Structure formats: structure tokens, C-alpha cells
Amino acid sequence: MKRILLIAMVVCLSMYSSFAQLPNGSLAPDWTLTDLNGTTHNLYSYLDSGYTVFIDFSAVWCGPCWSYHISGALENLYIDHGPAGYPNVSPATTNDVMVFFIEGDANTVANLGGSGGGTQGDWITGTPYPIICTDGTVNNAAVTSSYSIGYWPTIYRICPDRVLIESGQSSNPYSFVSSCPPPTTNINDVKAMAYEGVTETCSGSLSPELKVQNYGLTTLTSFDIEVLVNGVQNSVTPWTGNLATYQLTTIPLPAINGITGTSQIEIKTTNPNGGTDDDMSNNDVSFTATLAYQAAHVNVTIAITTDQYGSETTWDIKTSSGVAIASGGPYADGSVSIQTPVTTTLLQDQCYTFTIYDAYGDGICCNYGQGSYSVTDGNAYSLASGGQFSDEESVQFKTNISAPQSWDCISPGNCQDPGTGNGQYNSYVQCLTACFSTDIDENISERDFILFPNPANDIATLSFTTTETSKTIVTITNILGEIIYSNEIGSLNVGQHIMPISTYEITEGIYFINLITNNKIITKKITIVR
């Protein structure tokens, strides 16, 4: 469904290219709009009355929008749970939900009624909940901008506390209501909403951030934030400002230093407006902070194979202070495509974070092509790899390896450079051979491992079938046993797998492709020609 929508929204995406969907947990912007019947609606008035509000932001030309509209999910939601007394609504409703359809792409009422080109049909007839047009006649499309609509449809659920999430094209949208807190009756109440900093540190230091909400009926002008590390007070930060009822703010807190191993972090809000908090149950957030990183050589290589929608894929490497020092993408749409690997030389003894992003939130594998990524260092050690994620995936590493490469087999299928130059093996392949048996088991056999074309020029393709879920690694070595390519794919499900490998940067000659899976290794010879 996403792909049909993307074809239709090329112009729309360029129009709203600066927008990014409001993240879940954001405060919903208020609006006052007039529907097609001439009735004016204010969002916060409904929320303050205890309603959970659903908004369907759609465009009349959008096929997936139309499909969801005619599914009747929001119609049934409104009939069963909307306010009694509205046309076509049963008086037996639970009266705790309000629903709006907002045509956010500034199309006309005529288009909404099914007239003219570029509309999927009659959006008005049979729709019991209010329909709002933003063509500028009564309302403009400013509401679309305020909600950062980047694709159609976007369906938001907004709780009485004004916090929203994307509920998506759910067949049972009412299931999202139960997670909403009721309207507040507290006078003074500062709510610790969420911890928004990182939980893993490379340097032993964290820079915490706390999202808070005024859950009291009086304006919040001051409160304190206490941070405890393993039960011991680490800092107390006084906050002053002006926060109206239900408003949110994210507050940076003093750095937490000296983290070793794991530490239990607790953050508490206290003393709203210098007094007692009316609800102490929502004042705490806690998490485990971990000193965790992978040791890496200073040279780091990023290899990307996009799915059919490369324009959704970007990546970056950032310093511990958040400065991007390398990046890539977006890429071209059309087909699964091997991108030119990017190698970056980083500073010694520094912490870095690699992050890969997917703008739509469905990763780069596997519904629309076997996209993948790998991050390897100058010693051919895999720092990260994968393809199945949502909107982003990250890994931290520290460039504390500069000694000559060597490897130790630390566990079956896991070779690492100790960083001393004194590892047991001088070759990564030697280490892998020691870590894995070359016996063939029933999970994958020579018969199932196909390499084509061979000889290869720019691209070689592997085809293999697994009969059980298994961790898989692919390497290419030269005749000296030196590794020139490594991709730790991760855990593969049962079935056939087809994997393209870029060989265009490999010089002519004879090489060996090694498929390591289920603690076994299978090797095939490949010839590269130009």
C-alpha cells in the first residue's frame, strides 16, 4: 500500500519536503476549523471535555486514503463511540471519541464530492463525522503544516492530555483509546513523561534529557529535577519558566559522568510551583545506563544495498557531541542497488555513532527488495549490519585500535581484533576457519550454495537456502587469505536468500567467497575479470 501511495505523492512530497511527521509523544497543535456544514470546531475544547480525538489527514487523489476511508473503520468508530446527537449517530454511543476528516492537500469541495479529475470518489456522502476542506475558501492548509504531514494518509490519535501518536490505518482504532489518561483534576502536578537521552555511552558520560508535562490546572512556573545514580543523588536541577496545562518541554540535565558497567538511573520531578505535587505516581522515570561500545580501527567503511526505494535511505556517522562527520544518501528509487562503499578515516580514541535512517519507517529489507547495510573497520571487523529495522538503527564504537591487525576467536563464529597486534591469528579467515567447522551440515549444503556469474565483473550474486534460522556471514578473501570483503548479515530466517555483492572495486584475479552459517563454512572460488 505504501508503494502505491508513494507513486501518487511525488509532487506532494516535494511540496512538504521540509516536513517530518510529528514524533509519537508530541503535543498536538491546537486548531479552530469549520466543517462543510458550517460548524466550527476547536481541538482543545474537545480534549478538555474528555474526548479522545482521531484526525484523518488525507488527500482526495490518494488511493490508500480512499481505501481506508471506505473501509468504514472511522465511520464505525464515530457511530459506536462518538458524541450523541450528531446526525446518523446513535444515542447509545460511549461518547468518548471525536473523529475528523481533514482534506489537507488544499483540494476543493467539488473534489471532495467526487467531481473533477484527480479524486478517488465521493468522500462526503455517508460520512457521519465532520469533514474539513482546506482549499482556502473557509480554511487554509496551515493545519497540514502545523502537523508536519509528509505523507497521506496520516491518522493521529490525540488524548485529552493533548499528546498524540500515529494510530495508522487501524481496523480497530478504538483500541488506542484505552492508553489515554483521563483529563487532569490536579492543581499542581508536574509529570515526568519520558527520558529522551541515550542509555548507552562510549565515553562513560551521559547527557540526559527529560520530557515533562504540566499535568496540573495551574500554570507551572518552577519545579526541581533530581537525578540519582544507583540510588545516590547525582544532581538537582531547578527549572523555571512558564508551562500551561498539558504543555510539554524537554529539559537538558547535567552530565552523568563515571559510568562503568551498568548503572541504574532514576530521574524525579518534585516541588511544582514550590509546593506539594498532587500526584506523586507520575514523577519518576528510570533506566539502565550502560558503558558499551565496540572497539574499532580508525578506518570505517559503510556499504549500502538499497531496496527499491533508495530515496528513503540515509546514514551518518556522528561524534559523541552529535556532529556529523560522514553521511550518505538519499539514493535513487527503482531497484535494489549496490551503492559505492564509503570509507572514512576517523580520529583515534574517539567515540562515534553510526545511524541508518529510513524516511518511511520500514527499513530497507525485505518487502521491497533485499536491501542491507554493513559497517566494517579497517581490520575488516564487522561493527554493524542488517536491513530489517523501522525508522532508524544505530551502533556506537570507539576508535581505539591502531595496532597491526590480528584476530582472536572469542566464541564460535566471532573473531575480534584485540587491538594489541598480538592476536592468535594474522588473518581474519584463519580465525574464522578456527572458529567454524568446515563440515557441511543439514542447514545448508554445497548444492544449495550457488554463485553466479562466475567469472564476475561488477556484481556477483549468491543464492543459498537455509532450513533453519541461523547467523550468516559472507567474506571474500584473496589467495593469500587476506580478507577484502566482510558482511555479517545477522540472523536469516528459513528459506531461499539471494544476495548481490559488489565486485567492481576488486582487481582481476582469483578469490574465495566464504559463506559461514550455523557454525559451518562453505567456500567457493570466484574469478574477477574486467
Image (tube, rainbow, N blue to C red):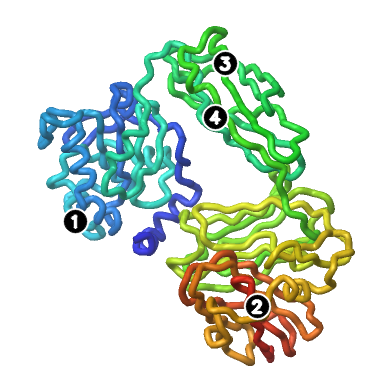
Instruction: Measure the C-alpha gap from mark 3 to mark 2.
Output: 58 Å
Instruction: Give the answer, above or below, for where 446 lies relative to 110.
Output: below
User: Can you see residue 333?
Assistant: no
* Circle 3: residue type: Thr
- Name the amino acid, label 4: Lys
Q: CA distance from mark 4 to mark 2?
A: 49 Å
Near mark 2 (Cα within 10 A), the count class, few <14, some 14-19 or many ≥20, is: many
* Spot occupied by residue 27 in the image (x, y as percentages of width and height): 44, 32
**Residue 319 - label:** none
State which mark lies toward you, 1 or 4.
4
Nearer to us of marks 3 and 4 is 3
Please state which of residues 41 and 363 is positioned toward the viewer in this rendering: 363
Which comes sooner in the sequence, label 3 or label 1?
1
Q: Which structural element holds mark 1?
A: loop
Q: Amino acid at mark 2?
A: Ile
Where does residue 387 sit, x and y in percent of width and height?
54, 63
Residue where numbered disc 3 is placed? 270
- Kind of element beneath mark 2: strand
Q: Give the residue drawn at x 24%, y 29%.
A: 96
- Residue indicated by mark 1: 121
Q: Quadrant of the C terminus?
A: bottom right
Quadrant location of residue 321?
top right
Q: Please state which of the two labelled residues, at mark 3 or mark 2, is closer to the viewer.
A: 2
Task: Looking at the image, tell me whether mark 1 or mark 4 is earlier in sequence order.
Answer: 1
Disc on the earlier residue, 1 or 2: 1
Q: Residue at x 32, y 22 (%)?
A: 48
Q: Which residue is mark 4?
A: 211
**Res. 478 in view:** yes
Residue of label 2: 521
